[in-house]
Image (tube, rainbow, N blue to C red):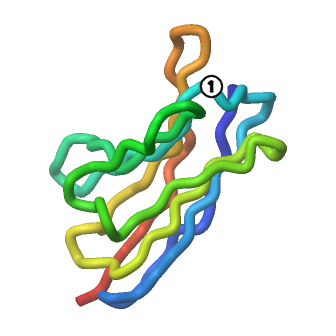
Amino acid sequence: VQLQASGGGLVQAGGSLRLSCTASRTILSSVVMGWYRQAPGKERELVATLRSGRDANYGDSVSGRFTIFRDNAKNSVYLQMRDLQAEDTGVYYCYTKVDGAAYWGQGTQVTVSS
């Protein structure tokens, strides 16, 4: 599975961005898709994940500001980010887990200027 992410960029604090990620093959709605991020000097952390039949799972620092959603017909997952803050800066990675194997996208840079 290849994951192609896009939508990162430079935004001012308080602004919004939407990230998109499309898989190279069919991803069932029951399979988890989501986003992680990695800030400079820090470990990769959960941003949000989603699978059918379960509530979305958000990292504590983004809950209430970010929304994850999917378009299963397009094998895509999106991350709507609002009220971005400097601490949201990092590389955002698309993620899925199929048949026990984890797959990661190439990462898209999000930079929030304060």
Q: In the rendered image, which quarter is residue 106 located in? A: top right
Residue 17 in the image: above or below residue 31: below
Q: Residues within 10 Å of mark 1 (few under 14, many from 20)?
A: few
Q: Position of residue 99 (x, y in %)?
A: 60, 9
The residue at the far top in this view is 99
Front residue of 110 and 61: 61
Badge count: 1
Residue 28 in the image: above or below residue 78: above
Q: Which residue is mark 1?
A: 30
Q: Residue visible at 26% across and 78% down?
A: 85
Q: Residue visible at 37% across and 42% down?
A: 57
Residue 46 in the image: above or below residue 102: below
Front residue of 8 and 84: 84
SS for dot 1:
loop
Residue 58 in the image: above or below residue 25: below
Q: Residue visible at 33% across and 61% down?
A: 90
* Left or right side of 74 for 6: left
Q: Position of residue 73 (x, y in %)?
A: 83, 43
**Amino acid type at image mark 1:** Ser
Q: Quadrant for the N terminus, please.
A: top right
Q: In the rendered image, which quarter is residue 29 located in? A: top right
Q: Quadrant for the C terminus, please.
A: bottom left
The residue at the far left in this view is 41
